[in-house]
Image (cartoon, rainbow, N blue to C red):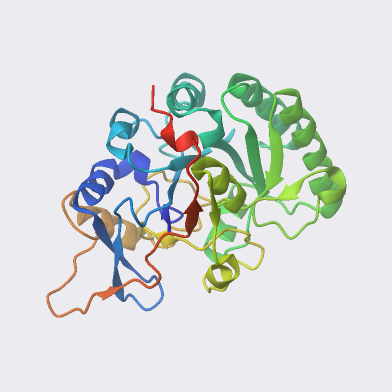
Amino acid sequence: MIISASRRTDIPAFYSEWFMNRIRDGYLISRNPINRKPSKIILTPDVVDCIVFWTKNPIPMIPRLDELKDYMYYFQFTITPYGRDIEKNIPDKRSVIIPAFQELSDKIGPDRIIWRYDPIFISDKYNVEYHMEAFTEIAEKLKGYTKKCVFSYIDNYAWINNAMRNQGAREIGTKEMQDIAVWVRDIAKANGMSVATCSERIDLGSLGIDHNACIDKDLIERLTGGKVKNLKKYLEHDGQRDDCRCMISKEAGARNTCKNGCIYCYANDSSESLEKNISRYDSDAVCLCDVISPDEKVTDSPDMKSLIERDNQMTIFDIKIK
């Protein structure tokens, strides 16, 4: 079983204490974002094969990584070139975020930290030349600290479009996407990184750029030293975008709880819900920024079992954090 922590919010940045308390107690409760039904997810090491963290600022979690010593995990770490007009609450990239990436990589290794440069949008301020210069600067600073860069172009969500239009974002044509992809590929390669896209319909295979799986079967097998069993069964699931290549996972987070303030965020669609949910945060609660009422029925999440068949060889799982 894979834990996603989280596509819906930035758990390392804002809810590390809550997550570590859930690890300590061995379970959490997560709501289905559509029907709001709560389900219990077991978090014990015997069923959790890997935890995938998604973050723009892991600093609050870094001192607590030893609490995850019995788990395999890796980070999807987003660093973009945008200022606080776009990402309102992200600390300074040069002085805070890039050094945090380097520190995290030093602790867990470059195989377990993936740089996300997404989403890419184009405007008069954030034009192609700006992206090229910024991407080059970040890639050079991350050289040796990661082996992979994942990028994407901004998605079309109704609540995002208006905000992005107000920022002067314009449509990116197919030819321009291809041109951007070429220099992303070349700059990344020059700094020791492979490149892939995330949930993109455009096929860049002819440019040597694959579609990415953020919850990545191949990476998880390399990290755990095992093989994923019955993969087809577990990939037949709803709720993912059509172009998503990820393995199925159990989601730990909740929508409308992320405080990064990124105007392109697909997981925050209501400022009122965001404020309400944040006000209910309790690090000891079983459900993130939510309350399970006594009359609600909590069911066990299905398929809470290991997907990995392991052999007796030493794997990266056996390497201790520095």
Q: Residue at x 25, y 58 (%)?
A: 27
Left or right of 206? Residue 282 is left
Left or right of 92? Residue 122 is right
The picture quadrant where one finds residue 43 is: bottom left
| Residue sitting nearer the eye, 167 or 122 | 122
Name of the residue lying farthest toward the front: 312
The picture quadrant where one finds residue 257 is: bottom left
Residue 144 percent location from the top left of the image: 61, 21
Q: Quadrant of the C terminus?
A: top left
Name of the residue lying farthest toward the left: 294
| Numbered circles on residues, count | 0
Left or right of 53? Residue 231 is right
Q: Quadrant of the N terminus?
A: bottom left
Residue 137 percent location from the top left of the image: 65, 22
* Residue 55 visible (yes or no): no
Residue 190 percent location from the top left of the image: 76, 24
Residue 265 percent location from the top left of the image: 50, 53
| Residue sitting nearer the eye, 32 or 43 | 43
Q: Residue at x 66, y 44 (%)?
A: 151
Check the image and report above or below for 5 versus 150.
Answer: below
Q: Residue at x 72, y 37 (%)?
A: 127
The picture quadrant where one finds residue 187 is: top right
* Residue 36 visible (yes or no): yes
